[in-house]
Amino acid sequence: MPSAVRITYDPEGDILFITFGTPTPSTGYQVAEHLVLRVHPDSRQATSLTILNYSAHARSRSPIPLTGLEQGQKTADLFAVLTSAPVNRFLRITEDAIGLQAFLLQPALDEAVAA
């Protein structure tokens, strides 16, 4: 499991980048309109999480629908990554009648952006 977490924020683009461990070649999956998860193709460990329109999501605290997850094994694999460390330190995934949704965990991300 990656040891270091690096969080950077681009205020001009309103994009939060969370990198887990040393940057490494990975496969990106757009799991929601504003969430991109990057996963190492061999270890299937999360290498980064990108949150677009970060400040709007942080202010509203509304769920982000996980519209990018399809049925099948890939969905099960991505769901496992999204609900495991280190991603689960920053997102909480729920499922209800609407479907799968992600919630940003506060205050961890707010403090990181303010730093």
Image (cartoon, grey):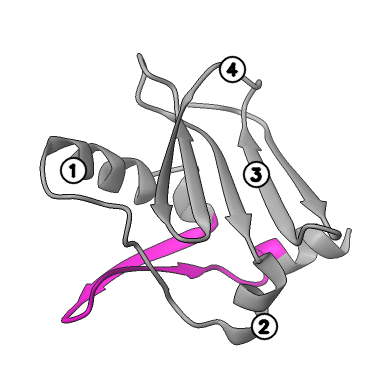
On screen, residue 84 above or below 48? below
Magenta span has 61?
A: no
Residue identified by numbered label 2: 59
Do callouts 2 and 3 mark residues in contact (Cβ within 8 Å)?
no
Residue identified by numbered label 4: 24
Relative side of 105 to 73, left or right: right
Label 4 and label 2: CA atoms lie apart by: 31 Å
> Dot 1, how many residues are within 10 Å of its Cα: few (below 14), some (14-19), or many (20+)?
few
Q: Mark 4 or 2 closer to N-term?
A: 4
Do callouts 3 and 4 mark residues in contact (Cβ within 8 Å)?
no
Q: Quadrant of residue 93?
A: bottom left
> Dot 3, how many residues are within 10 Å of its Cα: few (below 14), some (14-19), or many (20+)?
many
On screen, residue 18 above or below 112? above
> Residue sitting at 18 percent across and 43 percent down?
76
Q: Mark 4 or 1 closer to N-term?
A: 4
**Residue 61 at x, y percent in the picture:** 56, 82
Q: Mark 3 or 1 closer to N-term?
A: 3
Q: Main secondary structure of the magenta part?
A: strand
**Residue 14 at x, y percent in the picture:** 75, 62
Q: Mark 2 or 1 closer to N-term?
A: 2
Of residues 50 and 107, which is closer to you in this image? Answer: 50
Residue identified by numbered label 3: 18
Relative side of 50 to 63, left or right: right
Residue identified by numbered label 1: 76
Badge 3 marks a residue whose secondary structure is: strand
Q: Amino acid at mark 4?
A: Thr
Range shown magenta: 90-109
Label 2 and label 3: CA atoms lie apart by: 19 Å
On screen, residue 97 above or below 87? below
